[in-house]
Structure formats: C-alpha cells, structure tokens
Image: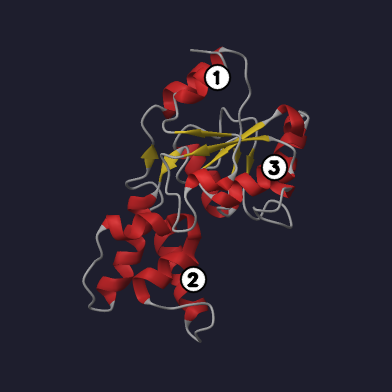
Amino acid sequence: MFDLDGTLVDSAPDLAGALNEMRLARLMAPLPLEALRPMVGAGARGMLAVGLSVSPQDADFEALRIEFLDRYQARLTQETALFDQVYELLQSLSAAGLAWGVVTNKAERFALPLTEALGLKQRALAVVGGDSTPHAKPHPAPLLEAARRGGIAAEACIYVGDDERDIVAGRAAGMRTVAAAWGYLGQGESVEAWNADIVLNSPIELLQVLGLA
C-alpha cells in the first residue's frame, strides 16, 4: 500500500501552481516551488498558511480553501507526474505477483481522476481517499479499508508513505511501515524519528527489501 502525494507522484508543481494563481490574482508575486514543496503534505491548510498567511481560525479561510481546491482541480494533471523509479517499481511488483494499492488523504474528487490519469487506478488493488472512510490518516481506517477491498489481511501488508502520519496509521493498522525519504516529509521531526520499520531513500530500494532485486 502506498501513499500518493510525495510517495508515488510529485504533485507539488500543480499544488504550488494553484496557490500561486491565488497570489497573482491578489497582485502578489509567486513563491518559488522550493518554498511550497515541504507544505504539500499538509494539504490546503498548509499551503494557505505559507502562501497567504491564513489559518482555519481566520474568517475568510473557508472561502480561500474552496478557491484553492477549485483552482487545483482545474490543473490536476498539468505538471504532476510519477516520481522517478515508481513506474519500474510498480511494474516489478505486478510481475512478481504482488498486489499494490493507494491510500491517500486526498479526497476522492482528486484522488480518483488523478490516479486514473496516471495509469494507477486501473492497476491498483484499491484506491482509498481521505473521504472514503469516516476517518483520514493517521487513523488506520483507510488502510484497513484498502486491505478489506483487496481481501488481504492487514498484517500481510506494507504501507509506504512520506509523512509521519503515514507511519502512525500503518502501525495502528498492524502493517509493516516504510518511510519514503524521497518525498515531501513536512517540517516536523526528521524521518528517522518517525519509528518506521524501514527508511528508504528511493522507490526502487523497496524491491531490495522485498527480495526482488
């Protein structure tokens, strides 16, 4: 099981693009991608905090959040692409007879068309979004739902993600956990402090862990 943004796909350019569209509409200079990339895992709240200095406590936050999400949906796959080595990784897993799926906090409105456009949805055992169950990660419910859909015991699964909440959710679901150090990682504790079972620096290293390379 894989997280989506920052693990399988680099969606930062389109998320940053949506935020910068909002800045330009307000006669503000665009921010460099490097300044916005670490906040991608924090969703609209994180992007609006760094890009427009607003928080959920602000009166106009909800209107700005809706605008951001609408702008993002309009450019969902404009610049988003699989990370290097991800295609090779997924091909190798399938060739070895290992099923894989996607569990993301991205709402289905974005997760389903994005994974379909990138050729993931058609091959995945399951694609579970942040609103597919009553709870999002770090709650284990989405991971358990993906395992249920695939008819696979949770303890037989590995969960790979680039945020500490991915590791928390994976442990709570009884899965082995892998931290994707090539991802966005956020601005919290270092990836080594997440207590993942394994930390990998590139997607293809997972094949070595699984004895497939």
Q: How far apart are marks 2 and 3 (CA)?
A: 32 Å
Residue that numbered label 1 is attached to:
93
Q: Is residue 61 left or right of residue 83?
A: right
Q: Estimate the x, y position of residue 7 in percent, counting from the top left.
A: 47, 40
Residue at horizontal 75%, vertical 34%? 154
Sequence order check: which comes first, mark 3 or mark 1?
1
- Tell me the residue at 47%/37% (across/down): 8
Q: Picture coordinates of residue 82 (x, y %)? A: 40, 36
Q: Is residue 101 positioned above or below 28 on the image?
A: above
Say which quarter of the image contains residue 20. bottom left
Render colour scheme: secondary structure
| Residue 72 at x, y percent in the picture | 41, 59
Q: From the image, state whether disc 2 or disc 3 is nearer to you.
A: 3
Task: Name which quarter of the figure residue 121 lies in.
Answer: top right
Residue 182 percent across, percent down from the top left: 41, 39
Q: Decide: is 66 above or below 93.
A: below
| Residue 160 higher or lower than 20, as above or below | above
- Tell me the element at label 2: helix
Judging by the rendered image, the residue that carries numbered circle 3 is: 171
Quadrant of the image containing the N terminus: top right
Assess disc 1: are there few (<14), some (14-19) or many (≥20) residues with their C-alpha within 10 Å of its C-alpha.
some
Would residue 59 be found to the left or right of residue 53 on screen? right
Say which label, 2 or 1, has the lower sequence index: 2
Give the residue pinned by disc 2. Answer: 66
Q: Earlier in the sequence, mark 2 or mark 3?
A: 2
SS at mark 3?
A: helix
Find out whether the residues at labels 3 and 1 contact each other: C-beta distance under 8 Å: no
Q: Is residue 99 left or right of residue 74?
A: right
Q: What residue type is labelled 3?
A: Arg
Q: Nearer the viewer, residue 211 or 123?
A: 211
